[in-house]
Image (tube, rainbow, N blue to C red):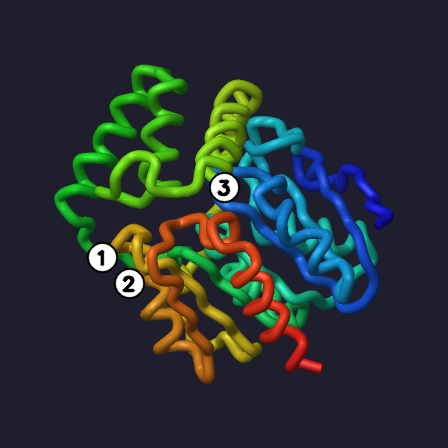
Amino acid sequence: MDITTGYAPVEGGELYYEVAGQGHPLVLIHAGVADGRMWDEQFEVFARRYRVVRYDTRGFGKTRTQAVSFSNRQDVADLLDHLGIQRAYVLGLSRGGIIALDFTLEFPDRVAALTSVASGIGGFETPPTETEIAQFNQMEALWEAKDFEALTDLEVRVWGDGPGQPEGRAPARVRERLREMILNNYRTQTVEPQPRPLDPPAVGRLDAVRVPTLVMVGDLDTSGCQAAMDHLARTVADAQKVVFPGVAHMVNMERPAEFNQIVLNFLDHLG
């Protein structure tokens, strides 16, 4: 399969991207604990039916940026412009799902369908569990200490295994790939650009989402992600929701075959 790679110019930076396949464009937006490689088990599968675009957001992977104020939403628009794409299906996981939803709200004419996986909603908050509070506080302390090895190990436990789950619950292949991506970002991405949030935030604007919407989440994910995905599915008109039992945050990496089939079934029925 032919894969085109390149860099798309954006405000104060360049986004690394990869494109494969023919058909309706489909943009994949990665999690905040990964980079575009997290879609390895989706990219070529989806490219058999669609023109698939995956890219590294600012501060991740091979993307280059200056220490500027920027908009993740405008970055997506600029990437689509660079590739000559007017309208696309948009799929994001975790932080990528927040970006996908915000992009849908700011550029509604450019989104044909939205898939949000294990994500949050801008402005939507629920109290974390005691276990989550302890782990999040530990993450913050390790970040302040710049102990990136220990921080990476903890993030693999929380986002790979699931908060409060036994260490090693997730398959080794998921844990190892997740660890490599997280540590690579900490080691190579030293510039800290400042994202401009959507204003007003998405939580009060969900009735403006007028495209077919698919919501997916694992039942071992954080309480916040589960609550946000439930709220999104209940609030967006005609949204479909799928819960993956026994799965934590990285749904597509833990259950790739099942994930791929659900996404393709959803998109294929859009015509």
- Cα distance between the residues tagged 2 and 3: 24 Å
Looking at numbered disc 1 in the image, what kind of residue is underneath it?
A: Thr
Q: Position of residue 148 (x, y in %)?
A: 40, 19
* Residue 184: quarter of image: top right
Q: Label 2 near label 1: C-beta < 8 Å? A: yes
- At label 1, counting other C-alpha atoms closer than 10 Å, the crowd grade (few under 14, some 14-19, many 20 or more) is few
Residue ID at (18%, 53%): 127
Q: Quadrant of the C terminus?
A: bottom right
Q: Label 1 near label 3: C-beta < 8 Å? A: no
Looking at numbered disc 3 in the image, what kind of residue is underneath it?
A: Pro
Mark 1 sits on what residue?
126
Q: Position of residue 199 (x, y in %)?
A: 44, 57
Which of the two discs, 1 and 2, labels the residue nearer the N terminus? 1
- At label 3, counting other C-alpha atoms closer than 10 Å, the crowd grade (few under 14, some 14-19, many 20 or more) is few
Q: Is residue 224 left or right of residue 201?
A: left
Residue ID at (48%, 30%): 182
Q: Nearer the viewer, mark 2 or mark 3?
A: 2
Residue closer to the observer: 4 or 109: 4
Q: Nearer the viewer, mark 3 or mark 1?
A: 1
Residue 227's label in the rendered image is 2
